[in-house]
Image (cartoon, grey):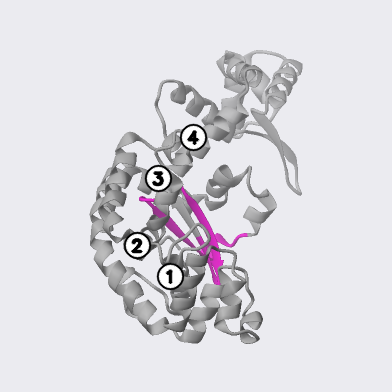
Amino acid sequence: MICDIEKAKALDFLKSFNLEMDEIEDTNSLAYRITDTYYINTVNSYLNEIKLYKSEIDKYISPEYNLFLNLYFYLDDKKQINNIYDYFKELESITKYEFKKLVFSNFNIGFNDYNNQDDYSIVESVNTDSRGKWNLLSMIQSTSKTLIDIRKLLEKLYPIFNRYEDVLIERSKDKMQSIIKMIKEQPKRFYRDMLDEYVSSKLIDSIDFEDTEHYVIYMNAHLFISEVFGNKRILATGIYLPEYFKYKNINDLFNNERRQQVMKSLSDPSRFKILTLIHSGVNSNKKIAEVLGITPAGVSYQTNQLTSVELLKHQSSDIETKLIVNTKLIEEVFNYILSDFGIYRI
């Protein structure tokens, strides 16, 4: 399921409080390398505007945890959150027991441990500084007040976020539609292109994409979020990520020698004609030879050359093994050429 904009906004908003830690203006950061000046300036304006509330925000956000976001995942699994206002409404329904369990799970402390220790002892075991420990202890001992405080704080901050988010959404409509189209039509290929060097193809193939919640996010445009919470798998893709990984993969794929081999084959009239004939369903060397006016042995030589550069590959079935055109490789070749001229397509 692809989440609508209001649901995506909720996740994007709650994750946005980590942006200050990302140092997006650092020239070595992923955000700086894959986005643009307009995005960087928009995010900085948003972060500057919410600085007034920094001391309050820091009670719930740290490098170790984002309590706002974890509460969202919990409530969405339990009650289905469709927008940020559902989240505000349901926050105070969380019991003290649930809240403690959620807080301690951030630090990989099992709930059985909690049952055997008092709050002070278990907070002491958490790997954070003394201020962080004090905040945690205050939150879990005053759960109702904590949840009310969180709701009131976020209700003040969401209109600020929403103003900047709407600007980013308006500017990224084409990117959004392209990403949604690819997730709907070819989800495995879409996520494999981005995650190939980080997770195995076997893991990607094992995911039931129909039963996954897919988010497209804008303020966190350089991030990919993967979360399994309860019965839900969540995949959130920053608006700039697909473009970055697609062209990163192309650049990694095409070393100079291989690139020259592929482009040389595509520029050869006979080999190009063989590719078009095979793609149209002609798989007989004899028929291809008749069209080209060469011998079947000549066709075999040319198809072997095309296979060696992976423009042709073998596809087997119970009935036969036949050659098919590697259209993905051809697409990547032309995307690479376009990228040399600063022209990018998702």
User: Which residue is denoted by mark 1 in the rendering?
Assistant: 72
Give the CA distance from mark 1 to mark 4: 31 Å
Residue at 53% across, 52% down: 187
Residue at 44% across, 77% down: 138
User: Which residue is denoted by mark 3 in the rendering?
Assistant: 178
Q: Amino acid at mark 2?
A: Ser
Give the CA distance from mark 4 to mark 2: 28 Å
Q: Amino acid at mark 1?
A: Tyr
Give the CA distance from mark 1 to mark 3: 27 Å
Residue at 54% across, 58% down: 226
Question: Based on the displayed image, in which of its 4 quarters is residue 311 positioned?
Answer: top right
Look at the image and give the residue range highlighted in magenta.
Answer: 207-234
Sooner in the amino-acid sequence: mark 1 or mark 2 = 2
Of the residues tagged 3 and 2, which is closer to the observer?
Answer: 2
Give the CA distance from mark 3 to mark 2: 39 Å
* Residue 134 placement (x, y as % from top left): 48, 72
Of the residues tagged 4 and 2, which is closer to the observer?
Answer: 2
Sooner in the amino-acid sequence: mark 1 or mark 3 = 1
Question: Which corner quadrant holds the C terminus?
Answer: top left
